[in-house]
Image: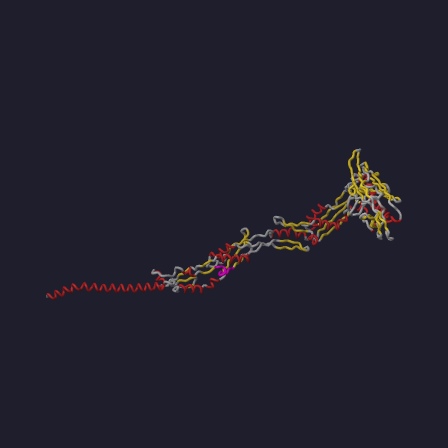
Amino acid sequence: MAEERDAGARLREETPRGTGQEWGAVVLRLLAALLVLAAIYVGAALYFKDRPPAGLSVAGVEIGNLTHDEAIEHLGRELADQEKAPLTLAVQAVDDGKPVGDPTPLTLDPAEAGLSYDYEATIQGVTGFTLDPRVIWSHIARSERELPLVGTVDREALDAAVAALAEDYDQEPVEGEVTLVDGEVEVVDASHGRELDREATADAFASGWPAAPEPGTTVEAAAPPPFLSQAEVDRFTSEEVEPALAAPLRVTAVDGEGEDAEEVTAEVPPREIAAMLSIDRSPEHALSLTLDEDAMLERLRQDLGQLERGPADATVRLDGSTVKTVPARSGAALDDEALMTAVGAALTASGEEREVRTELTPVEPEIGDEVAKAWKFSTMGSFTSEFPGGEVNAARSHNIRTAIERLNGVVVMPGEQFSLGAALSPIDASGGYQEAPVINNGRLVMGMGGGLSQVSTTVFNTSWFSGVQLDAHTTHSFYIPRYPAGREATISYPGLDNLWTNDTSTPVVIRTWTEDHTIHMEYLGKRQYTVETIEGERQNIQEPERIVDDAPTCVTQAPSPGFTIYVARVLSQGGEVVGRDEYTTTYIPEDEVVCTHPDAN
């Protein structure tokens, strides 16, 4: 019994020890299992660390459970065409808030514009080692999820690409233009320009990238207007140019009244009208037509001018030795200003309003008959001059008589300047003149109109004693004894002339004639001054030389000393001196020339 009790006691003592060992084994086995599971879990985490979760896609391309590099390569391959697809948006030109024309599509090459997909940035954060069970579970249990695609923008390259687009897009405004060519109207229509807003356009492409611009995406561009608008071109063409050239212009001029009236009509066709029109543009860019009024008047006078006649001033004429009055006569002329006003209005009209009717206006003479009634004529001054005769002087005498015939009866009106050269011209054979001796460089030579200096001297002295205004004369180079010393004048027109002005209130009539070998000349008019002549002594006398010339062109020359002399004309009126003309003349010696050639003289 005792052994049974001992055995029972041992059993009771040993039973708890055995149970503890069993539980320890269980724990160990559990720990081992947990370690295995942990190892498997960590191994799975290590396996999935470089792989996106299952069911993950980018732009419709699944990349789940691919390695990082495989995912990038796969996306690059699958999205290559999409990445390179051209981008398009519309550009609407706008002026003052209003669209101009239709939108223009602009297409951009993403690769050239620095637009690309960034696959690294796209899948960043979806790979890598983690023990997060949710992440591990996403690799095991498929869960559909779309990852947004990330793009990169190289702004410098994008701006350059947009600038290239702008070069093609931008346009200068087209200025409207209206021209007249060969009587026809040529019109260039005006249009706005285009200027791309480069920054806004680049922003529009970049803002949605990597997505392409939505269909209908529009950016605004500037539409600079032309200075000359199409509206102004249309207005000017329809309201001014076309009416002006629509039909011929008819202008009728009338001279006189009633049955005695005369009429002449001029018709100007559109082609001729166009040649007289010019197009002007104001600083405000408004167009207008300008008529060349001088050209139009000239054209109208080709027909209407036959009715015009100039007025004739009252004047006088010499009838023998008597001065008779020639009455004044009124003229008739077109009123240029009124006519051009009417023509300008007719150019914009049509039908009967395109016809102009104008009356000639009377033109009164400046010097009327009432003025002429006050003219009284008497001898103002006179002069006579003897010229050598004989056969050797026949040509010279002929020239003198020819000139005197031309001068007789010449009328110089008040305020008019008389030119002896003009009165005698042309001084050549066609004017009836011959060659005779003239002075050239101190020698007598044959020249056209020899002898006219004696006529010039006669005119100068008649002017001197008549008291008229002396304007210009030239003395001979050496003294000729038949002329008053210091009071003579040569002529070689147009280089040398003899000029005087009628400074009286009455016409001056030249009365002149030759009798035998004497020139008689007097001025008929109203003398206003008393003339006194002062003549000084001859000074600085120089003796001539003797020259023997065997040339066939030699002209015999008599000797005459050179000297200096002073002369003056004193003009008095009412006993008081009112004017004084003074002249100092120096003559060179006239050398004696002896001709020995048989053909000389």
Asked if residue 550 shows in the view, the reply is: yes
Is residue 113 shown in magenta?
A: yes
Image-based side of 289 in relation to 503, left or right = left
Q: Quadrant of residue 48?
A: bottom left
Region of the chain picked out in magenta, as a range: 107-114
The secondary structure making up most of the magenta span is loop
Q: Nearer the viewer, residue 283 or 523?
A: 523
Residue 133: x, y in percent? 33, 61
Q: Quadrant of residue 167?
A: bottom right
Is residue 314 shown in magenta?
A: no
Q: Quadrant of residue 461?
A: top right
The N terminus sits in image quarter = bottom left
- All told, the count of numbered labels is 0
Residue 415 lies, with reference to residue 596, above or below; the image says above
Q: Residue furthest left?
A: 1
Q: Residue furthest top?
A: 575
Q: Nearer the viewer, residue 37 or 500?
A: 500
Residue 530: x, y in percent? 81, 36
Image-based side of 388 in relation to 44, left or right = right
Image-based side of 596 in relation to 7, left or right = right
Residue 183: x, y in percent? 68, 55
Residue 142: x, y in percent? 37, 63
Image-based side of 120 in relation to 98, left or right = left
